[in-house]
Image (cartoon, helix red, strand yellow):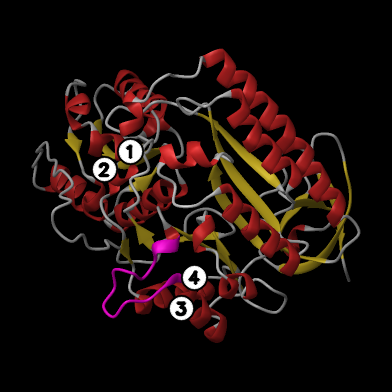
Amino acid sequence: MKKFFIQTLGCKVNQYESDGIALDLEKKGLQKSDTSSEADVFIINTCAVTSKASMQSRQAIRKIIRDNPHAKVLVTGCHAQTDPEQIKSIDKVDQIVCNTDKTKIAGHIFNIYEKHDDPLIFKPADHSTKNLFHSFDDTVKGQMTRAYLKIQDGCNAFCTYCIVPYARGSSVSMPQKEVFEHLYNLNQDGFKEVILTGIHTGMYGLDLNPKSSLLDLLKKMNDQRPVHRIRLSSIEPGEINDGIIELATSGNIICDHFHIPLQSGDDQILKKMKRPYTAGLFEDVVHKIHEKLPNAAIGVDTLIGFPTETQEQFENTYKLIEKLPISYLHVFPFSARKGTPAWHFKPKVDSQIIKERCAMMRQLGNTKRQTFIQSNLNKTLEGLVQNTPDSQTGKVKAVTSNYLTVSLDKNQDSKGKILDLIPEQFDGSMVISGKILD
């Protein structure tokens, strides 16, 4: 039996797709290997979100080939989509598969071994025609306690720093009937939480006929309850409306957790980024969530050191985050991406200044995280007990609806269950200890 190994770089969408590829390969009779040393076939699912990510993707490909010179190597993902010539220049890459053909990868590999067909294939993205949503035939379950479901792909925004629309094409949505089929299948297999993910999830449904919306989909989920709870992945500030916030209140299906990409708290920088909102709109959305859901987690992405960003403009971002009830921060240093308008923007911010600003933001993020944890201590929260123990404590751990990970003194029988718990204390390393209510 041939064995395969998948290396995934980048986002949750890539991870979902890698899990789908693995499922298809196992159906074809191949065996998944947990280590690269035993595999006959390698799939590298690349990322292109930054120049560094593209470089790391190429490094991963070369290392796989160097360590396994006789194996078959297939490359897919966003770097393969945006820079196929760079991938082709790497000796001993057997196949290059575009993003829209990821659902066909198992067939390609099957053909290599059964039909001795070994083509180097690639189909560039065609933005001139309407894209279709490409689904795996079977429901993707993955290896986690909480399942991902990709309901949307592609992006129409073309922010000036972002390569993703060139790699993923225009926004496309999974039909609602298919979404619910997958959710019911996941529920049947014991999953209590499903994370809805996509490249631009808030655009869900706008390409369907008849048109729909993310809110419409979530309302139907709330009515039908195909799984116990739904968590939203990243959602743009201008796409969080009163209806979506209401569906995260007690008794409804959406987790009280919003992850919102801010990028910058300065309006001029936002305009140069081509982000369709102002700092004021972002502030209003955060306050609206917090007023309705005072215990909700509100996570924020920031992109620091965008070309022309002055110290004052950086401080606008810092002060905005500082005064808002934010729960945690993801801080990214700006990295110029060739092929995007921002590649040419000047003046560039010195790399050392970017590093210092990022350090300040991360420290602020730590402070915000501690404040949020403190505000949740000794409160009753709903937690999903994970299948794997906490890496630091070895104890059973649970993820709460509002995105806290709590270590618990509880036996292994609680795995995969939804339980009420109380976070009681946490230490300097952010490990939260708690107890499950009887």
Contact flag, marks 2 and 1 (Cβ < 8 Å):
yes
The quarter of the rendered structure image containing the N terminus is top left
Residue drawn at x 42%, y 39% as measured from the top left:
273
Contact flag, marks 2 and 3 (Cβ < 8 Å):
no
Of discs 4 and 3, which sits in the foreground? 3
State the CA–CA distance, disc 2 to disc 4: 32 Å
The residue where tag 2 is placed is 166
Residue type at mark 2 is Tyr
Give whichever of discs 4 and 1 has the lower sequence position. 1
Residue drawn at x 18%, y 51% as measured from the top left:
127
Contact flag, marks 2 and 4 (Cβ < 8 Å):
no
The residue where tag 1 is placed is 163
Residue drawn at x 24%, y 25% as measured from the top left:
70
Contact flag, marks 4 and 3 (Cβ < 8 Å):
no
The residue where tag 3 is placed is 216
Q: Tag 1: Cα neighbours inside 10 Å, few (<14), some, or many (≥20)?
A: many
What kind of element bears circle 2? Answer: helix
Give whichever of discs 2 and 4 has the lower sequence position. 2
State the CA–CA distance, disc 4 to disc 3: 21 Å
Q: Is residue 33 left or right of residue 80?
A: right
Residue 319: where, in percent of width, then height? 70, 38
Q: Is residue 165 left or right of residue 217?
A: left
Front-most of residues 71 and 186: 186
Q: Which residues are magenta?
A: 202-214
Q: Does residue 394 belong to the magenta stretch?
A: no
Of discs 2 and 4, which sits in the foreground? 2
